[in-house]
Image (spheres, helix red, strand yellow):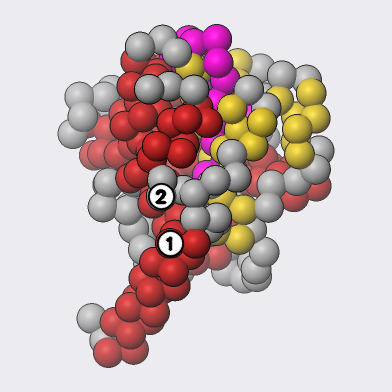
Amino acid sequence: MSGGRRLARIAVAAVLAVAVAAGVASCSLLGGNSNVPVATAKPPTGTDAAVDFDGGFVSAGTGSKKVDIWFDAMCPVCGAFEKTNGETLANAVKDGSITLRLHPLTFLDRASNGTGYSTRAAAALVCVGVHDPDHVLDYYQALFTDQPDENSNGLTDKELAKRATDLGITDISACIDRSGPYQAWAQANTAHSQSGPITVDGKKVLDTIQGTPTVLVNGKQYTGSISDEKEFASFLGVK
């Protein structure tokens, strides 16, 4: 690694540490869009297994309490949130307390050296939601295991597929190869996140998405510390 890149990564890590300590961090959706691949396929509509294309999410669980998370697979603050609160959410999915609705965004495509990583990761999650819906949560968590750094190339398509097969999830290689419509869907959702309004179950909850992660529980936004597991568990209403 070059000295300049090493210093850049150290600087990013330092900024993230300060932001997480502050407890209200998020990855900003503002920024340039140069060198970002644009999907041109027609986005799908309706529902398919665990994916609600019209609602803009991939779901895990069947609980009556609805938890919505807008995230970007390359956002380090999303990774920090998952590291702190992932087990709490996973347990609530598995015990039937919540339905977790994952809204993948793609604004950090600009930080993956032209590879469109956020878009490709979003499409891979959709592939799992369509072809192996019982493992959506597992794959979502896998996206944050050894999460690629901002301004890296991200994972290749083969590596995204391998994260699934390593967990015993259905091979999504062929789906990723033809995932243009899913990529277009994720990019359209990202555009809508900035134009708004943001609705949940037919009710407006926010004007726009200001950053990721944005987390709502039954339509109410969590504004506490992303690094305080007890605070989030209390907001979620679980022990």
Q: Is residue 1 magenta?
A: no
Observer-nearest of 227 and 203: 227
Q: Amino acid at mark 2?
A: Ser
Q: Classify the position of the N terminus by image quarter.
A: bottom left
* Residue 190 or residue 13, whichever sits in front: 13
Which residue shows up at 35% across the image and 44% down it?
84
Q: Is residue 195 above or below residue 5?
A: above
Q: Which residue is mark 1?
A: 21
Most foreground residue, 188 or 180: 188
> 15 left or right of 167?
right
Q: Marks 1 and 2: CB-CB under 8 Å?
A: yes
The picture places residue 60, in percent across and down from the top left corner, at 44, 20
Who's the residue at 66% across and 31% down the image?
220
Element assignment for label 1: helix
Q: Which mark is residue 184?
A: none
Q: What is the magenta segment's predominant secondary structure? A: strand
Relative to 92, is 121 above or below?
below
Q: Is residue 212 left or right of residue 96?
A: right
Camera-side residue of 55 and 169:
55
Residue 139 visible? The answer is no
Q: Quadrant of the C terminus?
A: top left
- In what element is the residue under mark 2? loop
The magenta segment is 56-71
| Residue 114, horizontal then vertical, whole percent | 49, 65
Relative to 114, does residue 219 appear above or below in the rendering? above
- Please name the amino acid that badge 1 sits on: Ala
Q: Is residue 134 left or right of residue 193?
A: left
Q: Position of residue 214 (x, y in %)?
A: 59, 43
Residue bearing the label numbered 2: 227
Q: CA distance from mark 1 to mark 2?
A: 7 Å
Where residue 166 sits in the image (x, y, percent)? 18, 34
